[in-house]
Image (cartoon, grey):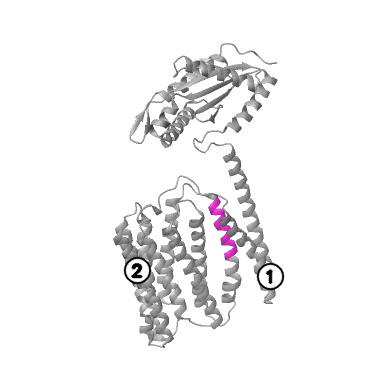
Amino acid sequence: MGRDRWTMIAWLGVLAISIVLRVVLEAQETPYLVAVAPYMLVSFATPVVVLIGTLRHRPPHRAGWFLLVAAQVFYAAADTVTVVDEVLSGEFLEPTPADLLYFAYYLLIAAAVLLFIRRRSPGWDVPSMIDALIVAVSAGLITWIFVLQPLTSDSELPLNAKLTQSAYPVLDLMLLILAVRLAMGTGTRGAVLYSLLGSLVLMLSVDTIYLVQNILEGGGVSESYLDALWMASLGLLGAAALHRGVRHFDLRSEHAQPDASPARLGVLAIAVLMAPGVQVLVWLLDWPLNIPLISGSCAVMFILVMTRMAGLVAAQRQAAVTDALTGLRTRRYFSDALSLECRRAGRTGHGVGLLVIDVDHFKRINDGYGHPAGDEVLREVSRRLSAAARAGTVVARYGGEEFVVLAPHTGPGELLALAERLRAAVAELPVQVGGELLGVTVSVGAAAQTHPGPDSLLRFADEALYAAKAAGRNRCVLADVVPATH
């Protein structure tokens, strides 16, 4: 722990000193190679620092971090070629060999972020993908109007230079989409994620400033404050790799983050409002209005937002009828399903069966092994009940350690057989909790009725459950007499 802390302090100290030196040396008009030396030191040190952090902390999945090391090697090589080109020619003749190295850097870092996303998120996480697309459309509109359009319309800029300079904002946009996807996806939060995101966002911001300034000034730009910001971006990347949180940073998450947090909604609101904001700004600048582009962007974002809202509504409905602990249906869903099935049975005359199931001596499990063990038992019992239930039944958690099974079109004999199958499925194997195996059984009360009423059917099944408990537990009891309701 102490060594990790001192390594982090040393890296941040070197970074801070290098940034100050870069700015001071530029201000004092020292020779170019001397002024740029602190920047080059950070550029060369970053892949080494990322490699040290990866080898020291040994995350379970290292491929993403090794891709970051390779990306930073290409970045340092591109910086070297850029400096050599500046010393030898004093101007940038695009495309230069450095551009190819920078392009390789973009692709490698994009591959690393994509790998982190796939490791951290179960499935495709469609909501986060839609959110990233909304931000991407907004950013793409801004990039085209304020960067790509001025570049492509510059008649004095050679075609090769246009293509080269246009590639950078496109690659930046690709990284922005991945960064948003990483930020809004599932997985652990903490210093590593925020440092990595900070590095990406800062790098993309400085790249944008560089491109805009390059367009406005009509030539190569080499300012100390831009180098300082790039160095800060590299420093955050190194800090992310040195943090011990890399050990669990890209572990797969089993649970999604809150789907509609205020921060997420705020980002989406800003992204959606960008299109009309850009239109107003272009109008104020007296630039030609690209109505088809802006209108098309608004239409695409509107469709994406509506898709997102539909997903939120569906997720809320699903959460309302799904028990968070067991994944079974909720008591509310069961009550509605029972009432609906009883009304159908009243019209058609078919029988309806109901099982009420209770975990035997569950309080002893909670008291003896703790509530986490009790939760694990409930999850495993739920899994076994779902696996053993027949198609068309509704399995729900009624409350606490009590479960219910609604079986339409079922008579007394079929219902008792189903109850016995469920009881045997639970008792067949012990449940593993921590390092121990616990024998778990259930008692089952069954009731079947033609022309049933919801309250009466539930009452008879509940009385049968109490009879099963009184008879010694771990057994099934069918209600003796279930009067029909007409």
Question: Dot 1: what SS?
Answer: helix
Verify CB contact (< 8 Å) between mark 2 and mark 1: no
Residue 230, image quadrant = bottom left
Considering depth in this image, is 401 or 59 the residue closer to the camera?
A: 401
Q: Residue at x 54, y 25 (%)?
A: 405
Question: Dot 2: what SS?
Answer: helix
The residue beneath circle 1 is 280
The residue beneath circle 2 is 11
- Magenta-drawn stretch, dominant element (helix, strand or loop): helix
Q: Is residue 440 above or below residue 191?
A: above
Residue extending furthest toward the front: 367
From the image, state whether disc 2 or disc 1 is nearer to you.
Answer: 2
Q: Is residue 192 above or below residue 35?
A: above
Q: Could you classify mark 1 by the number of other residues whose Cα lies within 10 Å: few (under 14), some (14-19), or many (20 or more)?
A: few
CA gap between label 2 and label 1 equals 45 Å
Q: Quadrant of the C terminus?
A: top right
Q: Residue at x 57, y 21 (%)?
A: 354
Residue 210 in the image, given as x and y percentages of width and height? 50, 76
Would residue 80 be found to the left or right of residue 454 on screen?
left
Going from the N terminus, do you reach mark 2 or mark 1 first?
2
Residue 307 in the image, given as x and y percentages of width and height? 62, 50
Q: Is residue 145 visible?
A: yes
Residue 222 in the image, given as x and y percentages of width and height? 45, 81
